[in-house]
Image (cartoon, coloured by chain):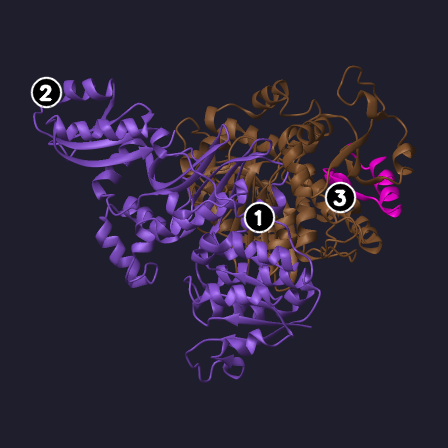
Chain colours: A brown, B purple
C-alpha cells in the first residue's frame, strides 16, 4: 500500500478523487500496489463530501507524514504550489501536477531536484489535459530528433473559433456563450490572449529540445481580433482559423510562437474542433505523428493526473529520466521566420490601391466576399516576419489604407 | 555500453541500422548508455554494406554471447522468429520486435517469460508503425477502463480506399498502382483481406482488456468487394469508406471485427488518408483520444523499434509490466452486434421492390446516383448482425434481388 495526498479539491482535485474511486481495482492492479488516498489539502470545508474525513488545512500534516510517498498538486497558480511542491520533493516525496504555470516556470528546477533525490516529478496533465503527450515525448519518441511541435493547445479558444466558423457569430457573442457554459473563465484573458497555450508550448519545447524555453520569450498573439468577417474570408479560401502554438528547430535554432493561423482543410489539425486539442510532432525518422483528445475538463485531466500517480507509485525509488535541463535556450527572433499573410484593409483610394499593394508586396492573391465591397483583402507571398511588419506599416504611413482591418498568418 | 543484435536485414532491419547511426548521440543520451550494434543476423550477404563486418548467419553466435543484452527481431513471420525470440528471452536477453504475426500469436507467452526473467519483451512497432500506441496503452491510459479501440491499422488498404475515393478508380486499378509503387505486396492478400489489421486489433485488444484475444476469433472482412460504384454512393451520402478494425467492451463482453465501414465526415478517422494510420481509444474517464501517424514504412517502423531498444536498455533488469495474461478471452459473437447497412441490389421487379424491401427491412433510406438507374440502393435501420444476415439472405430467397451487389456497414 502507498499513501498519497492531493493538494487542492477544486475541479481537477475532485476529479482525481472520483477517478481513484471509480477505477480503483484496475488502477491498483496497474500500479502493482494499493493506492490509499490519505489526505486532501484545501482551505475550504466540504461537509458531507467523500473526503470530509481526510481533509486537512495544514500542509505540514502531509509533508511531515513519512508514509505519504506521492503528492498530486492540482491547485494551479505558481504560489503556494511552487513552495509546497519543492518542499515535497526535497523531503523525498514524488509529485505529480496538472499545473502548467508551475511547470513552465519551475519545471527544470523541480525535475532536477527529483533526479537528485531519485524520485519523480511528473506533469502529463499540464499539457493537453488527458492526451498522452509528455510521456510519449519522453519515452516513445526517443529514437527521433524532434524538429517541430505544433498544436491546438487551448480548448476554450478552439471552441470559440469552431463556433464562430460554424455559426457565423462574432467573437464577443461566442465568448459570452462559452462563459455561460463554463468553457471560458469570467476573466478569459489567459485563454483568449494565448497565454495558456504559450505556457504549454514552452513546456513541450523544453522537453523536446532538452533545454529551458522561457515562456516570456515566446511570441504570443491571441484570438480577440479575429472577427466574423475574417471567418467568412477564411471559408471563401477553404481555410480554417485555429490558434496554433508552434515551435520549430532549423539549423540548430529554435523559434516558438502562438498565433491564430489560417490552415487548409488537408492540414491534420483542421478537423480538430470544439474543446478538443491535438498536438502534432515531427521527427526526423518517425515523420509526422499526432495526438488528439480532450484538452481540458475534470475527468480527462484527472485521468492524466492519476496515470502519473500510477507511474510514480511504480517508480517509488527510481527516477524516470527526462531531458529538460536548466540551461536556457535562446530562441530565434520571429522576425526571421518566413510567413504568408492574409491582410484586410479599408483603402484610401480604391482606384490606386491595387498598384500600391503591388508596389509593396509584389504579386498578391486577392480574395472577395459578397457583402464586403468597400474593403480589400489579399494573401501575400512568404516574407520574413520583420519585413512583413514593415510592409504592413507602410500601408499606414504611405496613405494606402485608412485602416488595416486584419493580419492573419497562413500556414503553408 | 550495451551490446545489441538485430535479427533480419530487410527493410525494417536496415532502417534500424540507419536510425541508430543517424541519431546516435541523442539515442545514447536517451538510453543513458552507449548502444553498440554488435551483430546483424541474415542468411544473405551484403558486401559493401555498413554492416558487412558484423553480419552473421548463425543465430548461436548471438545467443551465446553474454554481452548481448537486447535483441531486435525484425524478420517477420512466425518461424524461425518465435524460436529465436523465445530462446533469447529464456537466456535472459530482452527482445524488441516489429513482428505482428509473432506478437498476435505468442505475445502472452513471451511477455510471461520476460516477466519471469525480469527482462522485457517490447513490440511498439508491431502496431501502427511509428505511432506510439502500445506504450501509451500500457503506461499512459492506466487510470482508465478502456471500452473501445477503433483504428485504421493498415496503410495499404487505406491508400487504396483513399485513392479510389479521390480519383473514382476501381479497386483493381488502384491495387496495381499500389503494387507498382511498392505500397502493396505482389501477393496482397494479408493487407486487402484484412488479415494484417486483424492481427493488430488482436494485439491492441489483448493489451487493453488484459486477456489473450485470439486473432482467429475476430470477424474479418477485407476491401476486395468495394467498388468504384460504392464510392460514388458513399460520396453522395457524405461518407468515406474506411477499413476499420474495432474492438468494444460492453457489459463485460468484448467483440472485435475488421470490416469496411462508411463513416461520416465528422468522424475523427474520416480525415485519415493515404498511408496514414490512426487509432482511436475510448476510456471511461479520459473520453476519446486518438493517435495518428505513418503506420508503416522503413524509418517510421524503425523509429518505434529503436525507441523500444532504448527502453529495453534503460530497463535491463527490470520488467516493464503489461497486463496481457495468457488467459483466453471468449469474444462475443458479432451476430449480436447492432449494425446499420448500406445495401445495393439489382431488383427482379422494379415495380415491386420498394414494397418488398419495406416488408423485410421496414422503413429504409433510399440513395440514388445519376448513372445507376437499374439498381436500388438503401440504408437500413440498426439490426443485430445475425438478423441482418437473414434479411439479406431473404433478398435472394424471396426473389427480390437478381443480385445483391454490395453490403457495407455504417458507423453510427
Q: Is residue A225 visible?
A: no
The numbered mark, 3 or 1, whose residue comes first in the sequence reads 3
* Residue A312 locus on image (x, y percent): 74, 45
Q: Secondary structure at mark 1?
A: helix
The quarter in which the C terminus of chain B is drawn is top left
Q: Is residue B122 magenta?
A: no
Compared across the picture, whether B353 is left or right of B155 comes to left
- Same chain for marks 3 and 1? yes
Which residue corresponds to mark 1? A391
Q: Secondary structure at mark 2?
A: loop
Q: Which chain is home to disc 1?
A: A
Looking at the image, is A192 positioned above or below residue A257?
above
Question: Range of the magenta residues?
Answer: A75-102
Which residue corresponds to mark 2? B352
Cα–Cα span, label 3 and label 2? 70 Å
Residue at point 31% right, 51% down? Answer: B192
Mark toward the viewer: 3 or 1 = 3
Which residue corresponds to mark 3? A103
Q: Is residue A95 magenta?
A: yes
Residue A12 is marked as none
* Residue A39 locus on image (x, y percent): 82, 30
* Residue A234 locus on image (x, y percent): 46, 36
* Residue A350 locus on image (x, y percent): 45, 35
Residues at circles 3 and 2 in contact by the CB criterion of under 8 Å: no
Q: Which chain is home to disc 2?
A: B
Residue closer to the observer: B212 or A31: B212
Cα–Cα span, label 2 and label 1? 71 Å
Q: Secondary structure at mark 3?
A: helix
Residues at circles 2 and 1 in contact by the CB criterion of under 8 Å: no
Cα–Cα span, label 3 and label 1? 38 Å
Looking at the image, is B111 positioned above or below residue B255?
below
Count residues near mark 3 (Cα–Cα under 10 Å), then give few for <14, some for 14-19, many for 20+.
Answer: many
Amino acid at each position: 500500500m502507498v499513501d498519497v495526498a492531493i493538494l487542492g479539491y477544486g475541479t481537477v482535485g475532485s476529479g482525481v478523487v472520483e477517478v481513484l474511486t471509480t477505477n480503483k481495482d484496475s488502477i491498483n492492479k496497474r500500479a502493482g500496489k494499493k493506492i490509499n488516498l490519505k489526505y486532501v489539502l484545501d482551505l475550504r470545508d466540504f461537509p458531507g463530501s467523500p473526503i470530509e474525513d481526510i481533509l486537512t488545512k495544514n500542509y505540514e500534516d502531509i509533508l511531515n507524514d513519512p508514509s505519504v510517498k506521492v503528492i498530486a498538486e492540482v491547485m494551479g497558480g505558481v504560489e503556494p504550489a511552487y513552495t509546497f511542491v519543492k518542499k515535497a520533493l526535497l523531503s523525498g516525496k514524488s509529485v505529480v501536477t496538472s499545473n502548467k504555470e508551475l511547470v513552465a516556470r519551475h519545471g527544470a528546477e523541480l525535475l532536477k531536484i527529483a533526479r537528485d533525490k531519485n524520485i519523480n516529478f511528473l506533469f502529463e496533465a499540464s499539457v493537453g489535459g488527458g492526451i498522452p503527450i509528455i510521456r510519449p515525448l519522453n519515452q516513445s519518441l526517443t529514437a527521433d530528433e524532434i524538429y517541430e511541435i505544433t498544436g491546438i493547445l487551448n480548448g476554450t479558444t478552439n471552441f470559440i473559433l469552431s463556433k464562430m466558423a460554424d455559426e457565423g457569430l462574432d467573437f464577443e457573442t461566442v465568448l459570452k456563450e462559452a462563459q455561460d457554459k463554463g468553457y471560458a473563465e469570467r476573466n478569459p484573458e489567459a485563454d483568449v490572449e494565448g497565454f495558456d497555450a504559450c505556457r504549454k508550448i514552452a513546456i513541450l519545447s523544453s522537453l523536446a529540445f532538452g533545454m529551458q524555453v522561457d515562456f516570456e520569450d515566446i511570441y504570443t498573439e491571441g484570438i480577440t481580433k479575429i472577427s466574423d468577417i475574417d471567418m467568412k474570408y477564411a471559408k471563401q479560401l477553404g481555410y480554417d482559423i485555429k490558434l496554433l502554438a508552434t515551435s520549430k528547430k532549423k539549423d540548430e535554432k529554435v523559434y516558438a510562437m502562438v498565433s491564430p493561423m489560417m490552415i487548409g482543410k488537408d492540414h491534420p489539425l483542421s478537423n480538430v474542433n470544439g474543446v478538443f486539442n491535438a498536438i502534432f510532432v515531427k521527427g526526423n525518422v518517425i515523420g509526422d505523428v499526432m495526438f488528439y483528445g480532450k484538452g481540458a475538463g475534470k475527468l480527462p485531466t484527472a485521468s492524466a493526473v492519476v496515470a502519473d500517480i500510477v507511474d510514480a507509485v511504480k517508480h517509488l525509488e527510481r527516477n524516470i529520466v527526462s531531458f529538460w535541463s536548466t540551461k536556457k535556450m535562446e530562441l530565434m527572433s520571429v522576425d526571421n521566420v518566413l510567413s504568408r499573410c492574409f491582410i484586410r484593409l479599408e483603402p484610401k483610394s480604391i482606384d490606386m490601391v491595387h498598384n500600391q499593394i503591388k508596389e509593396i508586396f509584389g504579386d498578391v492573391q486577392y480574395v472577395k466576399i459578397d457583402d464586403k465591397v468597400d474593403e480589400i483583402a489579399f494573401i501575400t507571398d512568404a516574407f520574413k516576419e520583420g519585413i512583413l511588419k514593415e510592409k504592413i506599416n507602410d500601408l499606414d504611413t504611405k496613405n494606402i489604407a485608412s485602416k488595416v482591418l486584419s493580419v492573419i498568418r497562413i500556414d503553408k
